[in-house]
Amino acid sequence: MDLDVALKEDSPPALTEKSTSEEKREKERWEKYNRMRVRIMKKTIIEAFRGTISETLTKAKDFLVDIEKRFIKNEKAEIGTLLTNLFSKRYTGKGNIREYITEMSHLSAKLRALKLGLSEDLLVHLILISLPTRFS
């Protein structure tokens, strides 16, 4: 049983009166695996996405495209949040300076993981300008 048939192959053409029994079997096979694949994907995605997925999506490929669009939007929002935190973060003098620098480095690493890497020089500059004047 190859559940990925619905992802690997396009839907067979619509059946007509002239369709052969082989074409009919292939169409039934594809539709069966497509329904199973969609059902499996709906059950395995996190609950936060379940309510946002359109019930009209009946093809496994379309379902994956819809999920991908949501992750891209989510990724852009996360990048915006990380950049805002990185550029607006200030050391208040409370706590360990080393922990503060480590937090800034972690924010930079998270951005790098989202394919938006900052140069080390820029990170150092951001850290230095975020420190109070007494650290000059």
Image (cartoon, grey):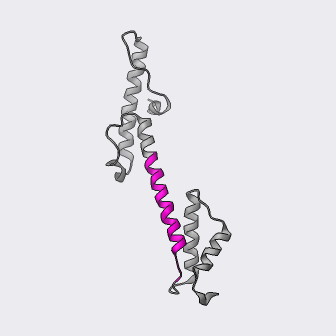
Residue under the point 51% across and 74% down:
88
Q: Does the magenta segment cover residue 80?
A: yes
In the rendered image, residue 33, in percent from the top left (x then y), is placed at 40, 30
Toward the right, the furthest residue is: 121
Q: Does the magenta segment cover residue 56?
A: no
Front one among 29 and 76 = 76
Relative to 84, residue 47 above or below: above
Q: Is residue 135 left or right of residue 69?
A: right
Residue under the point 51% across and 61% down:
79
Front one among 70 and 84 = 84
Toward the top, the furthest residue is: 18
Relative to 9, residue 25 above or below: above
The magenta segment is: 68-91
Q: Is residue 78 left or right of residue 102?
A: left
In the rendered image, residue 126, in percent from the top left (x then y), is placed at 61, 74
In the rendered image, residue 74, in percent from the top left (x then y), is placed at 45, 55
